[in-house]
Amino acid sequence: MRLLDRSRTAISTILATTVVLCVSHASAQNQPGRAQGERPAAAGPTAPGAVPGVPSPVTSPAGDSTAEAFVEPDPNAVTRDDLQGLVTDLENFKFQWQRERDLHTAISTRSLLIGGVIQTRIGWTEQPVNTATSNDRKVTFDTGAALLSFNGILYKDYEEGRNLTYSLRFGASPQQASNNSFLNLLDAQLSYSVLPTLAPEDWVLQITLGQQLLPFGLEVPASEELKPVITNAQFTTKLGLNRRELGLIIRGDVLPQVDYGYNYRAPVLAYAVGLVNGSGPNTPDDNSEKDIIGRLAFTVPSDYNSLLRQITLGGSVYIGWQNTFLKDEKKTLSGKGAKRRYGGDIYYNHYPIGLTYEFIYGQDDVTLGTTPEDPQKTRLSSLSHVATVFYNWGEQFLRGYRNQGRYDDWWPKTYQPFIRVDLFDPSTEVLENRVDVYTLGFNLFFAETTKFQLNFNRRDDRTNTRGAQHELLAQLQGGF
């Protein structure tokens, strides 16, 4: 408040002084008997301390008819003291403003954007949970995710658009390191744009080095706050794809379709290829091999108003290696085996209808033996299908509403019911071991980063003799 008062005082002083100068100038220009553009006649030497153009209180020489008359000083005249006082006020204002900014503003030598996500959750399960730390638990409170992110630009070439950006994220999430700390390092990466990115028609080629999400399918590369379902698809966890990896990944796209009227950009081809450790986040490589990952996505070229808009077909592959262990008590290291992941996906999002589907086939080498002489190495194959159908109504995702002016933090709301089918078979060689999860959900978006989610899950585990189980999850997400 003190800063605001001083700002108003300084601004008022500036405005008042400007008005005085304008009035004084107009008065001098409009004196009777002076033609437009005529310069005033010379009046002799100016009295010390007087302002040029302002009548002097000094009397005229003897013999003049007005010698005995006293000339009143112009009350609108600006003196040197007035100008000096204005300069002093501006300097004080500048000093106070800088001091307040230094005390109350987080200042960085480069552009910095601080954000975060908080997810609070309550869950109910039909079957009581019994573990080493819980007994007959049916209802529990949980934190789905608590994230703090720092993003910005280290270098920006305004002529060519080649930017060097950074991303740093900490917190707890389903895609975090496997430890009990709530301050895990999630993302730590630097990205450089090799090609110019000044216009939407420009092709994109970006190199990212560091710890990051994997470009595999649809759900794996989605950050925590963008997932439509509270729990991840089964394959992301059971096939080890839901974790960050350390490595180098090149991403890009070509032939973008651009519609300036709708602020729409969709590349015909998008690609990603990279090398990663394959051992998880915050962990050095645990073997002598590097894992290879690649993705290619094709989007049907179409106008913004076409029904074919945003139909994308994608394919992903992950070729890696993993350590294998014997089935003895010490879990002795027996060597390394193949780790393969192949996926195909379909994405269609044309408001108000949306559809996604993912197919994942996995291969893993494991050892079933207990001695190094007879490790009994075996390759297991897994299969997964995930399909989601959703419908939207409301205004939030319409650009006309998103771009209109808002008071305070008001946003138009959007409602999104959906149905999801998640099937996972951990070993196709074994009969009746598939786990099916059916989800009936509802999302209510209060703002772009704030939403309420409600999921009802039916879990049918073929290996569980007690039959299908049900659970109810409710989650509130807030972002900043």
Image: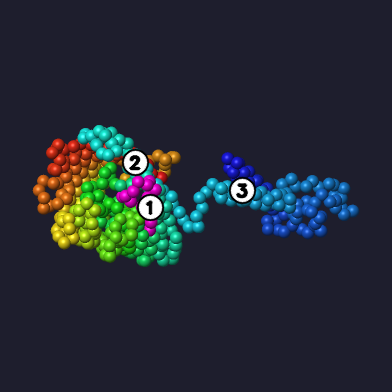
Q: Quadrant of the C terminus?
A: top left
Q: Is residue 311 found left or right of 55 in the rendered image?
A: left
- Residue 187, quarter of the rendered image: bottom left
Residue 475 x, y percent position in the rendering: 31, 39
Q: Is 50 on the left or on the right of 281, as rendered?
A: right
Q: Which residue does the numbered mark 1 point to in the structure image? A: 185
Please report the bounds of the magenta region as a residue range: 175-189
Foreground residue among 117 and 364 = 364
The Cα atoms of the two marked residues, 3 and 2, are separated by 43 Å
Q: Nearer the viewer, residue 2 or 63?
A: 2
In this figure, which residue is indicated by the disc labeled 2?
A: 143
- Membership of 178 in magenta stretch: yes
**Label 3 element class:** helix
**Mark 3: amino acid:** Gln
| Alpha carbon distance from label 1 to label 2 | 17 Å
Sequence order check: which comes first, mark 1 or mark 2? 2
Please tell me which residue is depicted at 74% across the width and 45% down the height of the picture.
Answer: 75
Q: Quadrant of residue 128?
A: top left
Q: In the structure shown, which secondary structural element does the residue marked by tag 2 occupy?
A: strand
Q: Amino acid at mark 1?
A: Leu
Quarter of the figure with residue 229: top left
Q: Is residue 190 above or below residue 30?
A: below
Label 3: how many Cα within 10 Å (few below 14, some 14–19, many 20+): some
Q: Is residue 125 left or right of residue 93?
A: left
Residue 156 appears in the figure: yes
Q: Camera-side residue: 89 or 71?
A: 89
x and y percent of residue 356 in the render?
Answer: 22, 49
Q: Nearer the viewer, residue 372 or 351?
A: 372
Find disc 3 in the rendering and name its residue: 96
When the figure is inspected, residue 357 is found, relative to residue 190, above or below; the finding is above
